[in-house]
Image (tube, coloured by chain):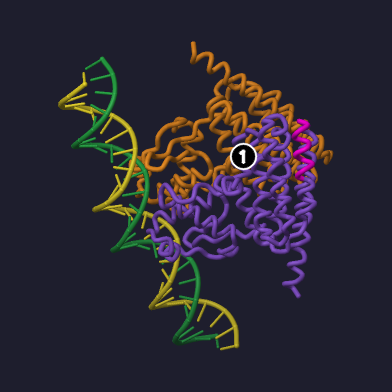
Chain colours: A purple, B orange, C yellow, D green
Amino acid sequence: MSTIGVNAMLIQVPEQGTLADVAAHRLAHSIVTGELAQGQKLNEAELAERFGMGRGPLREALRHLEGMRLVTRIPNAGTRVVVLDRKTLSDIYGVREALEGMACRLAATQMTDDEIAKLSKLLDSHEEQIKKVGGKVYSQSEGDLDFHFQIARGSRNEMLMHMLGSEQYQLLRMCRYRTSRKATRTKPALQQHRQIVAALEQRDGELAELLMRRHIHGAWKSISEMIDKEEEESAA
Amino acid sequence: MSTIGVNAMLIQVPEQGTLADVAAHRLAHSIVTGELAQGQKLNEAELAERFGMGRGPLREALRHLEGMRLVTRIPNAGTRVVVLDRKTLSDIYGVREALEGMACRLAATQMTDDEIAKLSKLLDSHEEQIKKVGGKVYSQSEGDLDFHFQIARGSRNEMLMHMLGSEQYQLLRMCRYRTSRKATRTKPALQQHRQIVAALEQRDGELAELLMRRHIHGAWKSISEMIDKEEEESAA
DNA sequence: TTCGTCTATATTGTCGACAATCGGAGTGAA
DNA sequence: TTCACTCCGATTGTCGACAATATAGACGAA
């Protein structure tokens, strides 16, 4: 329930407004879920047909996605889904470490007791999901995004929220869908989330920042190893 | 000279590619320089006429600018130039502090000796400009952007460069054009820049980050006061 | 075979016209 | 006067057709 609510925040409103907005939403979803593969070329006419609209609105949607770096466009040569290579992901996680650390530090002083309590309850539901194992690691991953986004909101810094919410997370989701199948690290991650919430409850911004930075750093190391293995496999 | 070169990086290529790209560039320039006032409504037909193109490409350009948060759009009600109120600017400077601090820390280990030397020479030319006073504070302000952007490049983190280059700086430039008339603080800023370069030369990332954060924090305090005075004046 | 060229085809870029929607002027009644 | 309603103009949203450009394949010469 809360997951759905926050998803709406993460991926914008579904079906309303102009056709271009709808197209942008559906395309973003398709890209993030991997339905559209990385590097895949996006044919305007074909997509317009599939969405039941003209090429005009669709082109506007592509321009919008270009702005959020979900696609790359080359004049007269079409637009393609962005490819997340190792370097790009490394850069993203580096920035995330700084940004989410900052969000945590601010959240420690800005969030209300109520919000922190909700955060704690969110973790309870995550723990629940993990216990009845197997059952879609996917949702756990989504739940993780919820957790991080709530903290970004707690910072009360609109610019920060936007950078972490609308832009970075879209790319992160792409990455997660790629790696979430061999889900590991959910339990230590939950543990770290709990530590962070504890720091927030104590209003200890410095500690919260430190823990969050460590958490994200660890996540990157884990994903990095996963990519190594994938590359080994595909090489062999 | 180098200013021009880097400006090309900051505000993208001028006249090439599709009409939509050209329009996006010209609009961004007009917004940043204040030729288009904050909050001003952007009439599609009128702008298309002025740029000598159809409304199609122009709409795509607006969608692009929407993506970089230079304009805000409301369905069926048009798009307007974004307004930078005090809260927004405060948020921006907060994020900048974290991001540019990070850039400095990375740059201290990633930049080549050659790049650092060039940075130092850049400051020499700034000092020159300041000495022959009066002469357009504008260029000094642009030079300042150069300095910061070069350090972002030095971080070797593409995501960071993009966030600091393509997005934030556009907004910052808007702000500068508003406040640069009553230029103060150029000399202490130069001093701080010199300290930062010194830290880079010593490959001391921690120190470089600290100095940069302090520098930006100071800049915000200065701008904040300036805004206060402006508001007082307009209130009286 | 292999390279270069050249043509056909598909795809992108652009325009003009039409439909849908919004804001405001004007009118009338309480 | 003031509120509500209606209608009209202006502006945005959408579509289809055309022009410009790049991609792929065939063809021929070295």
- Asked if residue B115 is among those painted magenta in the image, a careful observer would answer no
Residue B41: x and y, percent?
Answer: 40, 34
- In the image shown, does B44 or B192 lie closer to the viewer? B44
Work out whether B35 lies above or below A81. Answer: above
Q: Quadrant of residue B164?
A: top right
- In the image shown, does A3 or B97 lie closer to the viewer? A3
Work out whether D21 lies above or below B7. Answer: below
Q: Residues within 10 Å of mark 1 (few under 14, many from 20)?
A: many
- Asked if residue A198 is among those painted magenta in the image, a careful observer would answer yes
Residue A233: x and y, percent?
Answer: 75, 71
Residue D8: x and y, percent?
Answer: 19, 37
* Left or right: residue A2 compared with residue A22: right
Who's the residue at 65% across and 60% down the image?
Answer: A177
Q: Residue furthest top?
A: B236
**Residue B143 shows in the view:** no
- In the image shown, does B67 or A220 lie closer to the viewer? A220
Describe the element under mark 1 as helix, strand or loop.
helix
**Residue B170 shows in the view:** yes
Look at the image and give the residue range highlighted in magenta: A193-203
Give the position of the C terminus of chain A as an image quadrant: bottom right
Q: Main secondary structure of the magenta part?
A: helix
* Left or right: residue B167 compared with residue B148: left
> Which amino acid lies under the numbered mark 1 shown in the image of this protein?
Met
Residue A167: x and y, percent?
Answer: 60, 47
* Left or right: residue A35 compared with residue A103: left
Who's the residue at 69% across and 23% down the image?
Answer: B187
Q: Which residue is mark 1?
A: A161
* Left or right: residue A3 compared with residue B42: right
Q: Quadrant of residue B143?
A: top right
Who's the residue at 81% across and 34% down the image?
Answer: B207
Q: Chain of mark 1?
A: A
